[in-house]
Structures are given as structure tokens and as C-alpha cells.
């Protein structure tokens, strides 16, 4: 609705810049906010926050809006980074971007914006939202190659109700063309990748400053010693590079992949070949659930889900779900399901929510599957 005051989270990139531009053209009262979320070891080499701020200010001047700066570094360290470290210490591979969205970009930022008198916030995420029967739905972006709903599944109804995604209905090429046509200085700026506190720095060196490495042995599934690892935290399921065992060849000489972590014995388990059966699982258990849809999904209904951002949606059912955990059964085995990552469930273009992958499990026998399940349970409405 035009006339409302909206504060746009402006990162200095083309997407949030165009988001601000579109809203102003639509008649909103727009201002920008640049969020600084990291201070430790913050240099231009690894996390060019100063350069991004200069770009955001230049865009704001071009559009004709005000922009402020807020420092959420303390909140980020407390709500996101500490969890990031806990997950790695537990042997899992976390996705801090998911938690950053829920705790910083759509919580700390939203609270701050409301305190400034804003009616809602906006970001440059490629996603969409709509209200249906009193509930707000999170939808995939029009540009399927850029869809970011996977990273937003932990938002709640209150957050979704007060958020706009102006570029969600556009393709990336159109966003850049609009920025170029309107003379925005960031129209050809390279997209940022990764998370700011790691940036382009060597990951092992960075993580090793916060978590004490514990080197150990690398074994095959059969128990044969084939090498040594530098610490389980440095590896993830499905990893091929950096194992240091390329000279050891079995069978047809296919490359090695991480298949599992034996935390009890501090061993990394590897197999040869990307299509090795040990890299595929059709069932997982997820905890720390969050249903952005406002209700839990129905048991035994056919949905789709993905266990990593770039993965294609895969048909699945949820054969048990509670407030604490759920199990997801895929119609076909999925490659490299990784504890600590998120499984996100969809019904067509609607993101229902998901949870943190706790473990992979063996599928239940047909006779053990539940015959009846209660329908989805409403969790909350727009007011939270």
C-alpha cells in the first residue's frame, strides 16, 4: 500500500538497491538502513563493509532517500556466530545464513525499524509473500535460479506480515537492467558470496582461531586406514577436495568423498565415487523446527523438499511430526544429506518451513509406517 513508511535493508548490492528504487516509484515513504554485522577481523581484504557502505550511500543519493547505519555486531555474535561455533564443535555443518535472516535481518532489523516508526521493512531477497485466509505465505521467487526462500524458512508470521520483497517477482537480468537504466552505480557490481565474517579468507584458518582442531584418522567404510584429517569440523558430507588422499586409488580409481563422521572415534569415513550408495539416503530426522506457513504439515501428504540450497526439490512425505521433531521420507534417495544443514519443505511454490537435519535414518519397513496421522496444526496467526 502506497503512503506507508518502509525501511529497506541496503547492503550496497544491486538487489537491495533496486528494491529501494521500486518502492519509491510505487509511492512508499522510503529510507535505507545499512547493517554492520561483523567487527572482528573486519578488513577490506575479507569483508569490504566500508566499500559496501559507500555504495549504499551512493545509491541512496541517486534515488533521493535518506540512509542510516546501525551496528548489529553484538547481536550477530550472540544470536548467530556462537550457534555457528557450537554446531561445528558438535561435528555438524551449520548454515549461518538461515539463522542470520531469522535473528538479525528480520528480527533485530525489524524491531529497530518499528522503533523508528516504520510500518514495514524490505530486503533484496528473491522471494515473495502473500496473505491468504488470514495467514501469510512465503513463496518462491519468479526467478527460480535465484530463489532464496530456502534461507527464509525460519521467519514467523509476524515477520512475514511486515516484510516486502520487491525484486521477488523479477528475474535477475531485469533487476540489473533496471539498475543500469536508472543510473544506479551498482548495476554491474558482482554479487556477494558466502558470509561476511568468513569472506574470501581461508576457512580452515578462520575456524581454527575459534575451535581447537582435533586431528584424527581417515578410514574407508570397511575400516581401512587411508589417511589423516586435520579435524572433523573442517569437513562436510559429500566433500571431495582437501582430503589429502588423492594418491590412494582403489577399484577404477574414482575420487574420494566424505560419507560420514565417526564422532566417537574421531574418524572421517570416506568412499570412492560420487555415486557410492553410502552417499545417498532417503530418510532423515529434523529438529529445531520452524513453520513459516503458520501450521505444521500433514503426515503422509506428498510435498517436496530440499536439503541444500542448490538442490532441486524432491518429492517426499512427512510420516511423523511434532513440535520437537519430524521425519522426512524422500521418494528417491538424496545425495549427501548433511547434519546441521536445513531441510526445507514446499507445497508447490509455497514454502511451509523446515528444520535442522539431526541425522539420516534407515527407511521404515512398509508395515511399520503409520496408517493415520492428525491433520496439520495451526501454530499462530499474523499477530504472532
Image (cartoon, rainbow, N blue to C red):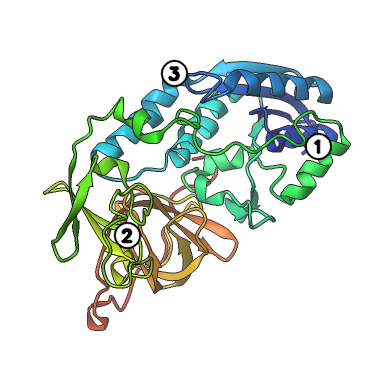
Which residue sits at x=53%, y=56%? 351
Where 293 falls versus 194 (above or below)?
below
Q: Viewed as shown, does residue 89 lie left or right of 109?
A: left
Q: Of the two numbered discs 3 and 2 on the same chain, state the one appearing first in sequence.
A: 3
The label shown at residue 179 is: 1
Label whose residue precedes the other's in the sequence (1 or 3): 3
Q: Nearer the viewer, mark 3 or mark 2?
A: 2
- Vertical side of 18 occupied by 151: above or below: below
Residue drawn at 46 percent across, 47 percent down: 380
Q: Which residue is mark 3?
A: 41
Q: Are marks 1 and 3 in contact (CB under 8 Å)?
A: no
Image position, residue 136 (x, y; %): 59, 50
Locate residue 301 relative to residue 10 in the image: left or right.
Answer: left
Taking the spot 58% from the left edge, 23% from the top edge, the residue there is 48
Foreground label between 2 and 1: 2
Residue under label 2, please give it.
256
Q: CA distance from mark 2 to mark 1?
A: 44 Å
As measured in the structure, the alpha-carbon distance from the residue carrying label 1 to the one carrying label 3 is 32 Å
Amino acid at each position: 500500500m502506497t503512503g506507508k513508511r518502509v525501511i529497506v535493508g541496503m547492503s550496497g548490492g544491486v538487489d537491495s538497491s533496486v528494491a529501494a528504487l521500486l518502492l519509491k516509484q510505487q509511492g512508499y515513504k522510503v529510507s535505507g538502513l545499512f547493517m554492520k554485522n561483523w567487527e572482528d577481523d573486519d578488513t577490506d581484504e575479507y569483508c569490504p563493509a566500508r566499500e559496501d557502505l559507500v555504495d549504499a550511500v551512493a545509491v541512496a543519493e541517486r534515488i533521493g532517500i535518506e540512509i542510516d547505519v546501525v551496528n548489529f555486531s553484538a547481536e550477530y555474535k550472540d544470536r548467530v556466530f556462537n550457534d555457528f561455533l557450537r554446531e561445528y564443535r558438535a561435528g555438524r555443518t551449520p548454515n549461518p545464513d538461515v539463522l542470520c535472516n531469522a535473528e538479525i535481518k528480520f528480527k533485530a532489523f525489524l524491531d529497530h525499524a518499528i522503533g523508528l516508526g516504520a510500518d514495514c521493512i524490505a530486503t533484496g531477497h528473491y522471494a515473495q509473500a502473500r496473505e491468504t485466509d488470514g495467514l501469510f505465505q512465503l513463496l518462491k521467487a519468479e526467478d527460480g535460479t535465484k530463489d532464496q526462500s530456502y534461507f527464509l524458512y525460519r521467519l514467523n508470521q509476524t515477520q512475514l506480515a511486515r516484510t516486502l520483497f520487491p525484486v521477488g517477482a523479477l528475474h535477475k537480468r531485469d533487476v540489473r537492467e533496471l539498475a543500469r537504466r536508472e543510473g544506479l552505480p551498482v548495476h554491474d557490481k558482482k554479487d556477494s558470496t558466502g558470509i561476511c565474517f568468513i569472506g574470501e579468507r581461508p576457512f580452515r584458518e578462520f575456524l581454527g582461531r575459534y575451535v581447537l582442531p582435533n586431528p584424527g584418522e581417515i578410514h574407508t567404510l570397511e575400516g581401512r586406514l587411508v589417511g589423516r584429517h586435520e579435524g572433523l569440523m573442517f569437513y562436510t558430507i559429500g566433500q571431495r577436495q582437501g582430503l589429502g588422499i588423492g594418491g590412494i586409488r582403489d577399484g577404477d580409481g574414482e575420487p574420494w568423498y566424505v560419507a560420514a563422521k565417526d564422532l566417537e572415534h574421531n574418524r572421517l569415513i570416506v568412499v570412492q565415487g560420487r555415486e557410492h550408495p553410502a552417499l545417498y539416503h532417503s530418510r532423515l530426522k529434523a529438529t529445531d523446527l520452524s513453520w513459516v506457513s503458520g501450521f505444521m504439515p500433514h503426515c503422509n501428504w506428498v510435498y517436496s523438499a530440499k536439503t541444500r540450497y542448490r538442490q532441486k526439490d524432491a518429492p517426499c512425505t512427512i510420516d511423523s511430526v511434532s513440535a520437537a521433531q519430524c521425519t522426512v521420507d524422500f521418494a528417491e534417495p538424496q545425495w549427501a544429506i548433511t547434519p546441521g544443514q536445513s531441510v526445507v519443505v514446499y507445497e508447490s511454490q509455497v514454502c511451509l518451513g523446515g528444520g535442522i537435519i539431526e541425522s539420516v535414518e534407515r527407511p521404515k519397513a512398509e508395515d511399520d509406517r503409520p496408517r493415520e496421522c492428525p491433520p496439520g496444526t495451526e501454530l499462530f496467526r499474523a499477530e504472532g
